[in-house]
Image (cartoon, helix red, strand yellow):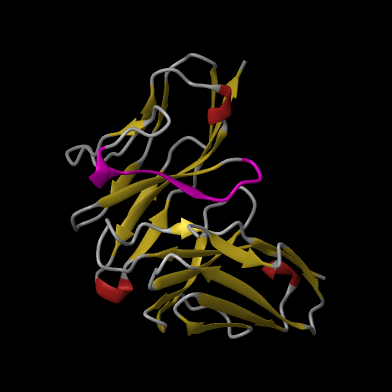
Amino acid sequence: DTEVTQTPKHLVMGMTNKKSLKCEQHMGHRAMYWYKQKAKKPPELMFVYSYEKLSINESVPSRFSPECPNSSLLNLHLHALQPEDSALYLCASSQDLAGAQTDTQYFGPGTRLTVL
Amino acid sequence: AQRVTQPEKLLSVFKGAPVELKCNYSYSGSPELFWYVQYSRQRLQLLLRHISRESIKGFTADLNKGETSFHLKKPFAQEEDSAMYYCALNIGAGNNRKLIWGLGTSLAVNP
C-alpha cells in the first residue's frame, strides 16, 4: 500500500459536536502531519508527529486535538469548532524528518469539513 | 525571514506553448525546494524536488542560488497540466523541520 488514506471524505458537524478525522499509512513512514487548506490557498501546517511524538504544534487552538496511537495511524479530534474552521483537512506522511530525501511528504485526499 | 514567493496567482497559456512558473525564496540556510501540484479533485502530490534533478511529466526546475529561484519550466504545455502549483521550502532542523509554502500559481492551459 503506497497511499495515505483519510476518512471520512466529508464531514458536517455542528458547533457543539465532537468528531474525529482519521489518517492511515502503511508505507513505514515515521513522520505524520495535519494540515488545514482553504480553497485556492496553500496548506497550513497544524501538527507534526515524529516517531509517534508530537514535534510541532503551530499554535493550533485546543479545539483541535491530535493523537498518534501508532506509527501508521493519526487522528484529529474535533470539539466545539467554529464555522471558520470549515476547510479541507489534509494528512501527510514522510519517511522521517532527517533530510530532503526522506522527508518528502505524501498527502492523503483530505476530509472536507463543514461546521454549521 | 524565511519566505517563498510565487508572483503569479494565475498563468494562462495555449497548448504547445512554453510555460514557466516562477518561485523565489528567502532562506539563510541551505535550501531544499519542492514543487507540488494539485489537479482538480485530486490530492496534493509531489512533482519535483531539487535534489533529484529529474524531469517529471516534462517539467524541470533548476535551483539558482544566486537569484534565489527555483522556477518550474515545461517547453510544451498540455491541457492536462492545468492545475494549481505550489513551490515549497524545507526549513528547520531535526524534529522542527517543516515546509513553508508559496501562495500557489493556478495554471490554465487552453486548447
Q: Quadrant of residue A49?
A: bottom left
Q: Is B14 contained in the magenta span?
A: no
When the figure is inspected, residue B34 is found, relative to residue B55, above or below; the finding is below
Is residue B47 inside the magenta stretch?
yes
| Of B105 and A106, the residue lying toward us | A106
Horizontal relation, residue A18 to residue B88: left or right:
right
Q: Which residues are magenta?
A: B40-53
Q: Is residue B1 visible?
A: no
- Indicate the position of residue B69 as horizontal and vertical percent values: 28, 39
Image location of residue A37, percent across then percent down: 59, 59
Q: Is residue A10 above or below residue A54?
A: above
Is residue B63 visible in the rendered image? The answer is yes
Which residue is depicted at the point 58% across and 63% down?
A: A5
Which residue shows up at 47% across the image and 14% down it?
Answer: B17
Question: On the picture, is A84 further left or further right than A99?
Answer: right
Q: Which residue is rendered at x = 38% and y = 60% of the image?
A: B99
Q: Residue furthest front?
A: A1
Residue B39's x, y, as percent? 58, 40
Q: Quadrant of residue B62?
A: top left
x, y percent for residue A53: 40, 84
Q: Quadrant of the C terminus of chain B?
A: top right
- The residue at 24%/46% (across/down) is B51
Name the quadrant containing residue A84.
bottom right
Q: Quadrant of the N terminus of chain B?
A: bottom left
